Amino acid sequence: MLIETSFKAAWWLKNPHLQTLYPALIRHTPTLALRRERLITPDYDFIDLDWYGESHQPLVILLHGLSGSSHSSYINGLQRSLLNKGFRSVALNFRGCSGEYNHTARCYHSGETEDIHFLYQTLRQREPNTAIAAVGFSLGGNVLLKWLGEQTSQLSLFAAVAVSVPFLLNACATKLDQGFSKVYRRHLLDELKEYIREKHLYLQHINQHEEANKLAQLGDLSDINSFWQYDDRVVAKLHGFKNSLDYYQRSSSRQFLKAITVPTLLIQASDDPFITRAVVPDLDELASCVQLEQTVAGGHVGFVMGNNPFKPNFWLDQRIPEFLALFSKATNQ
């Protein structure tokens, strides 16, 4: 179902790139009193969580985007807003994103749903009666939607929200090879390649030589200049895909949307520089419980409103808790 949006881009951030870059580079969020928890995964690696809120409140799981973490401004801003609306939150740092390298060669990718399911099962064992929701941004949104579709009716969640989702990974990888989007591509690839180099050294340092050797076998990555190449030479080899196309086909979330049974909101901007309009699903591809809110502007995980440049209004911090509150109230009635 397509729903009308309340979002109107700030007049001083009409450009999609300004909408994208302003929250990422300029936004400052107060330091939150987070509680860090480490979970040991079934494969004896670990994931780090950052909690915010009181134990009696409904809980929202948060999933960040590529090269992000629990300290990304959109995560911290939303955590604060959620608490103001009566929700506590737990931000999952994907493997290697918490400030410490994980202990295996594998890390995370757009279709990796084992860790979110492990976290969900852990939470459900601890708190079988707690009302739980989930929110994902960009890569985290793709992971969330794929997981919801894989699990169909097996999950006890009252709602979900996915923002700026790359529904078709192959088309989005190609989009980043075009125009100004190449600036984002270069920045992200530089971070990813540096991550692999540093993680290789770290694994050697902690005497995980077998895992370090898996990264060494990837070879020299310096000549990689597209996500098609990176995903073919790194993601596919580390995570058991035939090649980048196999990874994209199996991990893209669009094919899972019809199977979702949790009330879900999709928030997408038509001018998103990471995504083409053709990537956004048609309404007949959505399950009846999935709503699409598509804005004209907003960039990628941007959505900044307000008439005063010195007092920006980060619309997602209002819209997401508003949507969750509708279903949280229904759950508690």
Image (cartoon, rainbow, N blue to C red):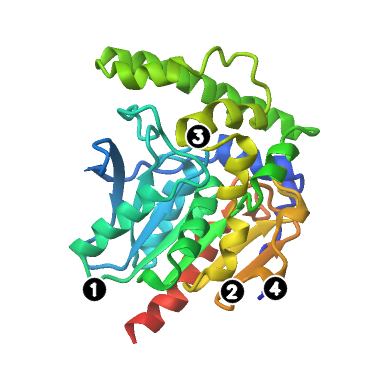
The residue that disc 2 covers is 287
Which mark's residue is nearer the viewer, 4 or 1? 4
Q: Which of marks 2 and 1 is nearer the N terminus?
A: 1
The residue that disc 1 covers is 129
Which residue is found at the position 34% from the left and 27% from the top? 101
Which residue is found at the position 62% from the left and 58% from the top? 254
Q: Where is residue 100 in the image (x, y as percent from the top left)?
A: 32, 28
The residue that disc 4 covers is 284
Q: How far apart are marks 2 and 4 (CA)?
A: 8 Å
Between 288 and 72, the one nearer to me in the picture:
288
The residue that disc 3 covers is 67
Image check: 149 left or right of 114? right
Which amino acid is tagged 4? Asp
Q: Distance between the residues labelled 3 and 2?
A: 30 Å
Which residue is found at the position 33% from the left and 17% from the top? 202
Which amino acid is tagged 3? Ser
Which amino acid is tagged 1? Asn
Quadrant of the frame with the N terminus:
bottom right
Q: Is residue 256 in view?
A: yes
How many C-alpha atoms fall within 10 Å of the one at disc 2: few (<14), some, or many (≥20)? some
Q: Which of marks 4 and 1 is nearer the N terminus?
A: 1
Quadrant of the frame with the C terminus:
bottom left
Q: Dot 3 lies on which element?
A: loop
How many C-alpha atoms fall within 10 Å of the one at disc 4: few (<14), some, or many (≥20)? few
How many C-alpha atoms fall within 10 Å of the one at disc 3: few (<14), some, or many (≥20)? some
Quarter of the figure with residue 20: top right
